[in-house]
Structure formats: structure tokens, C-alpha cells
Image (cartoon, rainbow, N blue to C red):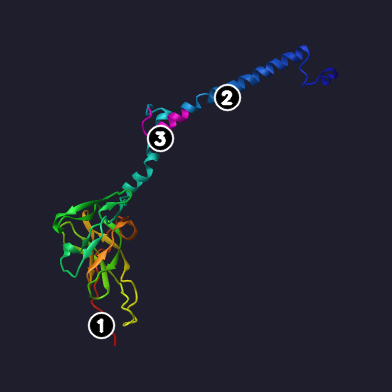
Amino acid sequence: MHGLQNVDPYDFSGGRNREIRDKAEGARGNLVTRLLDGFFNIGQLLDNIATAFFGSGPFDPNSPMGRIQTRGVLINNMQKTTQKLEGIIGYGSWVASQNKYIGIINNATERVMEFDTQQGPTEGVELFADSKFGNRKMVRLKSRGLWEIKAQTKGRRTGYTGLDKIYLDIVVRDPQGSEFYRRAADAVAHKDDGGALPNRVGDGEVCIKGDLFVVVPDPDFTVHVELFTDRWRWFYGGSVWSGLSVLKHSSEVENEGTVDPGTPPVAG
């Protein structure tokens, strides 16, 4: 017992101790080897997992990697799949590619401003030429539900006289072309008259915006923008001053329709 107490467990110079040392080194080497073997093909493993997540891995569906592949495909498409299952996917944005010159007219076709240049991706909507309105470009909503619509342009004065107001209406029509919903916005674009009328100060230009939430009961309702003016004007196209966007929030169709309490009485 006393002899064992004098053995240094960290001294492997003796015969028996050399044997212990060799076994220890062997065990350590085997452990490292097994660990390295486990990670030796890590690059290939990661590649296989990546391939599985993109849906083209050559795996047996019943194998562990096959199950990873199946889940990878689901994860890779989760957002799109979920949105479609919920039925609330729909969006798009466009700008007008040209400036529009418009006067004091009552022709609905001529009042339409075409937002004909797509910006970014679209889903659940499409731009189309509406034959009922002289093939003017409009937006079709391809599913029912609650949609948010925004539009903007800028009115610029001309040399013609007239009143200073301009108007922007967002118009929603059913698939047959009948008006379903309209949201109006107006703005005053004063032109400085040299001080004769102090309340008319400005450069004759103004940015006008419209927005609304609307519930459409069926697919294929359409959206377009109509402009009105009390004097001949240019309206700006381009990505700085013009835009039309739609975004779907829900597939529910409760509380659709319009409310019209009539024109308010004259004050006093």
C-alpha cells in the first residue's frame, strides 16, 4: 500500500506506468478519432441540409434526412403558404410613367390617371387595360376582402384662368364596371396674384393624396384614380410625385357598402 502511495500517476517513465500511459494515449486518440469521424463530412452534411431546405435533396422521405427535407420545404415556403392559407395576401404598387394634362371636362375616361409602371413585387392583384374605359390601365383585385388603397399626384398650374381647387377620387368598380365605392380628396393650389388678393399666395402647385379602406364582396373588382380641376392643369407622373398602392388586410367581408348622410346644410 505504501508502495502505491509513492507512485506518481503523472510519471509514465516506468515499465507499468509506461503501459498505463500507452493505454491512456490510445484511448485519447480513439476518442479524438471518433469525434473527427463524426464531423469529417460536416461540409457535405450542411450541403445536404441546405439542399433539403430548398426542396431538392435526394432523400428517402421515410429517412431522417427525408423528414428534414420535408420540414425544410415547409419552412422555406412558410410565409407564402401561411398567407395563402389565410387568404389575406394581396399587394402592389405602381407609378404613372407620364405627366397628365387635364382640363375642365366631364368625360370619365379622360379623367383617369394611369399608374402603369410597377414598383416591386405584386401578389393577388394585376394591372390591366380596361376596355370599358378606353383601355386605360387599372388595377384588378383578385380576391374579396378588406383592401387599403392609397394614391397621390401633384397638380401644376397652367396659364389658363379658373378656380384653384383640384380633386383626386379613388374609384372602385365591380367586375361589370358599375361604380361600387368612391373616396374623394381635394386641395387648393393658389397662384400668387401679386397681392391683389392676399389669401391667394403660392406657386399654383399642390400635392394631393387619397386613401381608403374598402370591403369588396367578390374577386375582380377594379381600382383607378380620377382627377378633376377647376382650371386646366398638369398632373405629375414619376416616382417622386405619383403613386398608387393596394394592400389586403383581411378576407372577411362584414360591413361592406357605403353611407351617405347627404350634403351638410349651409352654416348659419
The kind of residue tagged 3 is Phe
Discs 3, 2 touching: Cβ within 8 Å:
no
* Residue 79 locus on image (x, y percent): 37, 45
On whether residue 50 falls in the magenta region, the answer is yes
* Residue 137 locus on image (x, y percent): 21, 55
- Sequence-wise, the earlier of marks 3 and 1 is 3
The kind of residue tagged 1 is Pro
The residue singled out by tag 3 in the image is 53
The kind of residue tagged 2 is Leu
Indicate which disc residue 265 carries: 1
- Of all residues, the one furthest to the bottom in this rendering is 268
Residue 90, relative to residue 33: is it above or below?
Answer: below
Discs 3, 1 touching: Cβ within 8 Å:
no
- Of all residues, the one furthest to the right in this rendering is 2
User: Nearer the viewer's eye, disc 1 or disc 2?
Assistant: 1
Residue 236 shown left or right of residue 70 in the figure: left
Give the spatial CA distance, label 3 vs label 2. 26 Å
Label 3, residues with CA under 10 Å away: few <14, some 14-19, many ≥20: many
Q: Quadrant of the C terminus?
A: bottom left
Give the spatial CA distance, label 3 vs label 1. 65 Å
Q: Element type at marker 1?
A: loop
- Sequence-wise, the earlier of marks 3 and 2 is 2
Discs 1, 2 touching: Cβ within 8 Å:
no
Indicate which disc residue 111 carries: none
The residue sitting at 50% across, 27% down in the picture is: 42
Q: Element type at marker 3?
A: helix
Q: Which one is nearer the viewer's eye here, 74 or 165?
A: 165
Residue 104, relative to residue 122: is it above or below?
Answer: below
